[in-house]
Image: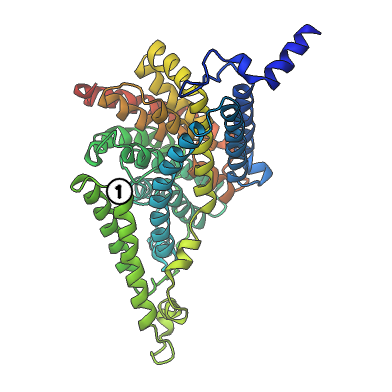
Amino acid sequence: MNKILTALMMLLLPSLTFASSATAERLDLTSHPVGYAALAIFVLAYLFVMAEEFTHLRKSKPVILAAGIIWALIGYIYVSHGMNHAAEAAVRHNLLEYAELMLFLLVAMTYISAMAERKVFDALRAWLINKGFGFRQLFWITGILAFFISPIADNLTTALLMAAVVMAVGGDNQRFVVLALINIVVAANAGGAFSPFGDITTLMVWQKGILQFNEFFVLFIPAVVNFVVPAAIMHFAIPNEKPVATNEDVNMKRGAMVIVGLFLATIVTAVSYHNFLHLPPVLGMLTGLAYLQFFGYYLKKTHNFKNSPYDEDKADQNVGDIVPFDVFNKIARAEWDTLLFFYGVVLAVGGLGFIGYLAMASDIMYTQWGPTSANIAVGILSAIVDNIPVMFAVLSMNPEMAQGQWLLVTLTAGVGGSLLSVGSAAGVALMGQARGIYTFFAHLKWTWAIGLGYAASIWVHMWLNASLF
């Protein structure tokens, strides 16, 4: 009975469980019931995220709720200790970090949506199908394209585009489709690891100012190794056959290539703002959004379907003139579930950090294990838990590491998600797109080959860039 009463007093009178006084700037809640409750809430939310494929509950919902509850618990404790504004200041700091990344991603997603609406990606898919390549050739072509498109777009969009090609040409040949989709996931994740734009985790590291734009590119060769090793192994399992060619013809809509050029100009603007003007990259991206807005205004003012000759061979281009281009429709088509999921992750992990768990984890991983072991473990963990919270946790810990170690954790967090189909947004998306064909266990069958590529890429990075450690 005494133990029960003591436990109730600890819950109702939280001041009894701290060593810190109310005058301290931050309370250590790691051994407090609120800390344990916050951990349990975060784990429960992430179980719902991992079960998205089966529950069809969008991943943003549980993490947003978890973030709100975690900070409510923290706020209650701090108010009860007379520290009314400490938690508020921490939340505002996390919101600023989120706002920069969200706006950056929103501009990138808007451009991708605009290019998709102008049929840029459909034209690429039709061109590949019409060339009559064999299955083994398509396996390598789609993988290489995924590797090089991902650094400019993002791994999710790239994977969905290449998967559409594979499923269109693969037909009933499920063996080819499964292996090609696994290859695309690996390639898209590897390609995103050596570019600040290729993955949210690399974007986070760049915007934090830990690595400069050009410093990411030393990861190019390790990323190539990560992609090529499992691809070379899977190559021999691909049927040595040729799919039936089609005569599909897709014409891009008016202004498509100009939008591609404006997107590249936007990337240059963001890099220039950061490198030469020492301004946040998001400011350059938003400036680039204005490029698209002005070009959208031009397309809207110059569309005139009624007075233009109709050419049946270019129907897609004509359709592009029926409905005026509206940039705000493209913004509305952004991956809002992903953006809101990112909000929930940043705030929830920020809350756990404010409680004191990230400092504890940093001490265990980066002091006791050492940075190399810790950074390799980060990659393996990102195969189980999405790499966004893992990388945000590392950045929040901000351990003292050499540049080579920061590059190592950037690499492992980016490519570690390829080990399992649920380890990256690309893998999860393709399980939905190729439901019943590309599955968790189909991917798991080749995890050993992907693991070899993971290990080889780490070794290559530590060998080639030894001077950075």
Residue at x 41% of width, y 43% of height: 96
From the top left corner, tell me how far across and down residue 133 is, in percent: 39, 55
Q: Amino acid at mark 1?
A: Pro
Residue pointed to by mark 1 = 281
From the top left corner, tell me how far across and down residue 429 is, in percent: 53, 47
Residue at x 24% of width, y 21% of height: 469
Quadrant in the rendering for residue 327: bottom left
Residue 179 visible in the current orientation: yes
Q: Residue furthest bottom?
A: 307
Q: Is residue 452 above or below residue 345?
A: above
Residue 445 visible in the current orientation: no
Residue at x 46% of width, y 40% of height: 92
From the top left corner, tell me how far across and down residue 24 is, in percent: 47, 20
Is the residue marked by circle 1 packed among few (<14), some (14-19), or many (20+) residues within 10 Å? Answer: many
Q: Is residue 242 above or below residue 295?
A: above
Q: Residue furthest top?
A: 2
Q: How is the image coloured?
A: rainbow
Residue 81 horizontal side relative to residue 246, left or right: right
From the top left corner, tell me how far across and down residue 438 is, in percent: 56, 43
What is the tally of numbered marks visible in this picture? 1
Quadrant in the rendering for residue 106: bottom left
Residue 271 horizontal side relative to residue 248, left or right: left
Residue 57 horizontal side relative to residue 447, left or right: right
Q: Quadrant of the N terminus?
A: top right
- Near-viewer residue (462 or 201): 201
Q: What SS does tag 1 mark?
A: helix
- Near-viewer residue (222 or 11): 11
Residue at x 36% of width, y 77% of height: 299
Q: Is residue 455 above or below residue 117?
A: above
